[in-house]
Each structure stands twice: as structure tokens, then as C-alpha cells.
Amino acid sequence: MDNIQALLIGCTPLAIRRSGCVFDLGAPIITAYASELNEAFTSLASRFHDVILVNAEMLGANPEKVIGQINVVSPSSQIIVFDEDDSEDRAIRLIQIGAAECLTVQESNLNNLRRNILKVLERSQGGTWLAGQISETLLTSTFEGAVVLDDQLKVLLWNPAMERIFEVDRGAVTGKDFEEALTFLSVVDEKGCLNEAFNGKRVVTREQYFYNPDTGKSGFFTAFYSPMRNRRGEIVGVVGIVKDVTKSKLNERTSFEMAQRLVALTNSSSNMQWISDSSDNRIFFNKRWLEFVGNDLDDERGCGWRRHVHAEDLKRYREITETAFESHMPWHMEVRLKGTDGRYTRFFESAFPLFLADQTFIGYVGYCTDVNGGRVTSPRMPAINTSTQTFNSLEMSPIGIVNLDTAMTVRNANKRIADLFGIPVNELIGRKINEILGAFDMTTLQVVLSRGEKIQLDNHRVIIDTENGESVRYWDISCWPQRDAGNNTTGICMSFIEATERYTNVQQKEEFVAALVHDLKTPLIGAERTLEAMLKGALGPVESGHQQMLAVLQNSNRSLLTMVQSMIDMNRCENDILNLSLQSMKISALVRECSEELRVLFNSHGVQLKNLHDPKMEGIHVMGDRMALRRVILNLLDNALKFTPYSGTVTISMRCEADSIFLDIADTGIGIAEEECEKIFAKSFQGAIGKQMGGSAGIGLFVCRKIVRVHSGDITVTRNAMGGSTFTIELPRHTNNLVAEGVQSGIAETRPN
């Protein structure tokens, strides 16, 4: 066995002094002595010691500082403290701050010291051996290249990944000088990087090109080199991790070439077009766009183009595009853009994801079409049919577009409509839209005309008559008003986008998740019943300590069960949204019904529920699905109760402004952090306070907002000045002169004739 170097700091242990024995631990342990800390640090700096024996008296009042200094000077040495204090707590504390072992007065005799020194070293060497085995395994099995060189920069290890990257066999380089074995890397000065690492630096190289003339292999790589040290801290070699970046480099080149082709294509288009990269930075705008905004390409790149988007549209625009970039899905939306004359023009924007041959996502290409008649470049030009001009630019669009007059008669339609409806364009023009879409609820179009609102119907179920019978499809349908120069409504524009494949994929995923969640519920219920039985003594008396552990398990299981049930409810609710049945109803009666249903629950929690009745609201109607809106109101009231402490108050009030109804639910609870006011409506989001309260999957408000937005409304939240929060539901007011009460859903089935 090799000699073991030990250093004793301070006086010998009390047990040895009392016995009168000479301090000799016997071969192979060789002991040096240091009576003071300064003397000990000098000795440690000049020579490596396997073990450091420290009299606890030398640690003083700040043992963390002393042990920390010893570890800094000699990080590989094992520290054994012998202590005349038999306190177990003190021993544990010393081990926690870096001591390998702590011995009491009785344990500090010669035999125990020797035995503990050998035990600590064996444990240390075993850990070193295990670490070496782990390192060897990682280096040889990793997907990244790994190379280990000695102090002469000769190759000790060359793993299979290195063979794959450079096409050089391990046998051809092992034991040889790095530069001599890999002469083709000399052009990138790789040996210079290795010398820097051998001098103690960590080096990261940039992307380097290589060519192996023996095999013809070429590519790009990056490398990370780090010095390798022994137990004494001396540099004995270099470890390198090499990454093959050839594929990503070629993808960049392919992306650039594709972008150049797209540039030539988009510049020849009459539509405004743009191209973005995979990080939502727009890198190109065609001539038509630059002419419209009056800027050059550098001003528009990145996020510069956002200055042209109307302030009221920008937030919604960003929400839609951020969601699309996460899922790599296309989007279609209406947006107002400011031109060189300072006026805003309404465009219909469509964007489609771009992929390489290996399905690598590289960005989007999008185009904007003026749906209000296009631009007239000269006021002296003779009068032209603006709607015809618009549809000439939409003929190649993948979106079906129909233009209606105020009498709901089709004025124009593009070729895509013929494919969707199965009716030639010339047979559509001049017909009433309700004749073509027999079951379509005309209330939707009347609202667009009377209020000038845009209405969006996503995943709208339709039935198409085909040669093989009826076929169920799903479309995204948008309806928005067309206006003349005086801002007068002159008709309606409708767009139809095929969404069947997307809807089917989403449904399949949701059905799989729903089935999985239902399967999870069964074992959780079984666990709940088992824990309940154990707590009641079904297996015999339960000790107090075990009872507490079982109670913790039961609470955790109940939280999981609550989250699973919430996910089931959300899935059921989202499916119900697709089949809403709208009717005219008094909103005040619905609010009163919900508040009375929960009043007993509020009273049991010591929270006052106030319903501020306004007689003016009694005759106010909304068009909506009663059960869906009821679910929203009950959910908001339940949340208000959950976050309002005892003796607090929750107040319900309603008001009517213009054509909108506002329902406010205000509480005096713990409130919502300002930075979370919008995030709480995101799917599966829970705020810091909500996580502390527990018992929720964070999905209630997401579903509530989705329901209200299907009703052409919205939910917002504000912080109250005196504490708490106010949730506001905004819904369009329904008047009977638009349509008789009881008109059925705008989400109903639509069947082309």
C-alpha cells in the first residue's frame, strides 16, 4: 500500500495524552505536525496530504470559515475532526460543513484514529473510482464527440462519436500526438485551443469547417476544451467535447436559398407579403408592402412593422401569432394597417408555416389582401367596380371569400368558394346567402350590419352534399362589414377556411387525453378510499406519527383527484362550446338565480354576497346559451368566495352602456398581482396565491373566457383600490327588433343547398 500522508493540526487527542502513549499511527500512515493554523496552511500549500486531523479547539467560534479555508488550500484532502465536546448536534454540524468524520473523546484513541483514517480514505477512493467509471461510460456512450489528451497532448481516449464526426478510427489516433494524428485540423488552429486549455483556461471554439482528405469527409463542428486536474489540483491533461453542427449549418444554407427564391416570388405578387424566421422576426417584406407603408426594408425588419398595426388590433394580433408560432399552425385574421397617407386600411392577413424537407420549421410566409375594395392610385381614373377589383386579387387565395350587399345577396365570390360549396361561382352570384346556406342563422349577419361588429365562428360544423352522400366538415367562418369612404356599411364580407383536418387532429388528441384522465380517476378514488379506511383503523390502531403521514398522503391524493376532475370538466365544457344553443334571455334573472343558489354556501363561510339590483336592467336581454353563461357566473362567484377571507364581501352589479351589458363581480379578497391579471386567463395557469390555496388545475377562467368570447363578449379583471379584484363580463345587448326571441344557435349546423 502507498504511504498515507497525514497532517495533525493542534494538540494530540485528549485520550492519547491521558494514556501516555506516543502519537504513532503506524505504517503506512506518515504524520506531520502543525501547532498553529498559519503553519498548517503553509504545509498544505507546499505538499499534498491525504488526511488532515484537526483538533476541534483550532476551529474556534467559526468552524465554517476554518474548514472552508482548508478545503480551498487542499480540496482533495479528507478532514477528520476530534472533539472533546461529545455533542451529537455539533458533530453533525461539522460533517455538514465539510468534515469527513467527527470523533468524540472516547473515539480519539490511536486504534480508532487509524481505523477511521483508513475507512475515510477507502470511502474516498471508492467514490473516485466510481466517478472515474461514470466519466468513462459517459465519454464513450455520449452522442457528442469526446477526446481526452495527456500532458503531452497525446490522445488517451477517442470515443465512437469522434469516429463518426471525423471518420478517423480510434486505433489510428490513440497514443499519438493530436496534431500529428489529425493533420487536417491544423488549418483551424485546434492545437492552439488545446494549449490554452492546458494553461488552465476553458475554451469554446466557434463553428469550424474541416475536410478529411483520406476519406473525403467534411463538415462543421464546435468544441469545448477544459483542463483535467489530479487530486492535487495539478493539470495533467485536457478533456474536449466536440459537437457536429454540419446538419444545422446546411439547414441554414438551405433556408437562405429558399428565402431568396421566396423573395423573387413575393416581389412579383400584387398582394402585400412578408417572410419571418422561426423566432417571429420578420426578415423580408415585398415591394407592395414597402410601397404601402412608405418605408425601406431595414425599417420594417424585426418588429419595426408593428408600428403600422392599429393599437386596438395589436394585442389581439400578438396573442394569435404567438399561439400560432408555438404550434406551427396557419392563421387568418383581419387587421388594420396604416399607410403612407396616415389612414388605416382593413386587410385580411393569412400566414402559413414553412418547413424544410426534414420537417424543420423555419418560419412563416404571409400576405395581406385589402378586402374593402383595393387602392385607387389616381383620382382621375374612371369609376371602377371596387368589389370586382378586390376579388381579382383574391382569385388565387386558399380562403373562400363571399361579398354580400345589405340585402344579403351575393355580389362576388372567389374560386375557392366553388370548391368548398360545390357550386359554380356564376350560380352563386345574385342568390340570397340564406338560400345557399339554408340552416345558417341570419342573426349573425344582422348583428354585423346593425352594429358593425366582426363575428368569428371557429370549427363551425357544416354538412356538404356530395356524390357519396352527406359529408360533415368543419370551417372557420368570419363575417365583417364592408364600408365606403364615408364609413357607411355597404355590405358584408364572409370568409370560409377549411378546418376539418385540424379539427379532427385536435379532437383525436383531446379524446385521448380525456380517456387518459378518466382512467387516472379510478385509481385515485381507490387510493382515497383506502387511505380513509386506514385512518379509521381498518388495519388496526394508527399511531399519531403515522396518522399525520397518512393525512398528508390523503390531502395530496385529494388535490390530484380535484385536478383530474377539473380536467374532465374542462374537456366536457370545451366540447359543449361547439354545440351551444342561443336564445334571448333576461340577464338579471340569470344572475339572480346564480346568486341565490350560492347564498347558503357564502353564509357558511362567513362571506356576505350582495346583489345590487338595478330596476333598469330588468328588461335587458342578451342572446346566449343559458347553461354556458350560468356556468361562467357560478365559476366567477365560486372563485371570489375561495379567495375572500371570513367577514369579507362579494358584490354583484350590472350596468348597460351603449350596445353592451357589463356584469361586475367584485370581492374584498386577497387580490391578484398586477403582472398576473392577464395570465390567469391562460390555459393551466395558476398564480402564486392560487398554488398556495391548492385544489385547482388552473383551467376555470380559461374556459370562462372561451365561453364568453363565443358569445362575442369578453372577460377582464382589475385590481380594486381598497383590495380584492373585480371580474367584468361584457356581452352584446340583444334587442328584439333584430330577431325574435328564441332564435336558435349561430353555432348550429349549416347545410349548403
Image (cartoon, helix red, strand yellow):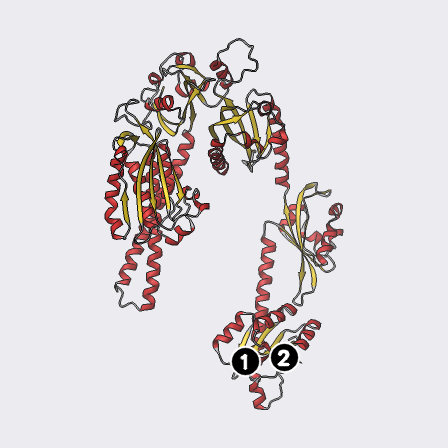
Looking at the picture, how far across and down is residue 47, in whole percent? 70, 73
User: Which residue is labeled 1 in the image?
Assistant: 83
Q: Earlier in the sequence, mark 1 or mark 2?
A: 2
Considering the image in quadrants, where does the N terminus appear?
A: bottom right
Q: Nearer the viewer, mark 1 or mark 2?
A: 1
Amino acid type of the residue that numbered disc 2 sits on in the rendered structure: Leu
Q: Residue 434: which quarter of the image?
A: top left
State the residue lying farthest toward the bottom: 20
User: Which residue is labeled 2 in the image?
Assistant: 8
Amino acid type of the residue that numbered disc 1 sits on in the rendered structure: Asp
Q: Residue 568: which quarter of the image?
A: top left
Relative height, residue 524 to residue 210 (above, below): below
Looking at the picture, how far across and down is residue 588, in whole percent? 26, 35
Residue 633 appears in the rendering: yes
Considering the image in quadrants, where does the C terminus appear?
A: top left
Secondary structure of the residue carrying tag 1 is loop
* Camera-nearest residue between 249 and 35: 35
Secondary structure of the residue carrying tag 2 is strand
Residue 511 appears in the rendering: no
Residue name at image x 55 percent, y 10 percent: 381
Residue name at image x 31 percent, y 69 percent: 543
Number of dots carrying numbers: 2
Relative height, residue 75 to residue 578 (above, below): below
> How far, Cα to Cα, is label 1 from label 2?
13 Å
Relative height, residue 680 to residue 337 (above, below): below
Is 221 left, or right, of 363 in this rendering? Answer: right
Looking at the picture, how far across and down is residue 188, in whole percent? 74, 46
* Camera-nearest residue between 208 and 575: 575
Residue name at image x 24 percent, y 46 percent: 599
Instruction: Bin the neighbour count of mark 2 within 10 Å (Cα to Cα): few under 14, some 14-19, many 20 and up.
Output: many
Instruction: Bin the neighbour count of mark 1 within 10 Å (Cα to Cα): few under 14, some 14-19, many 20 and up.
Output: many
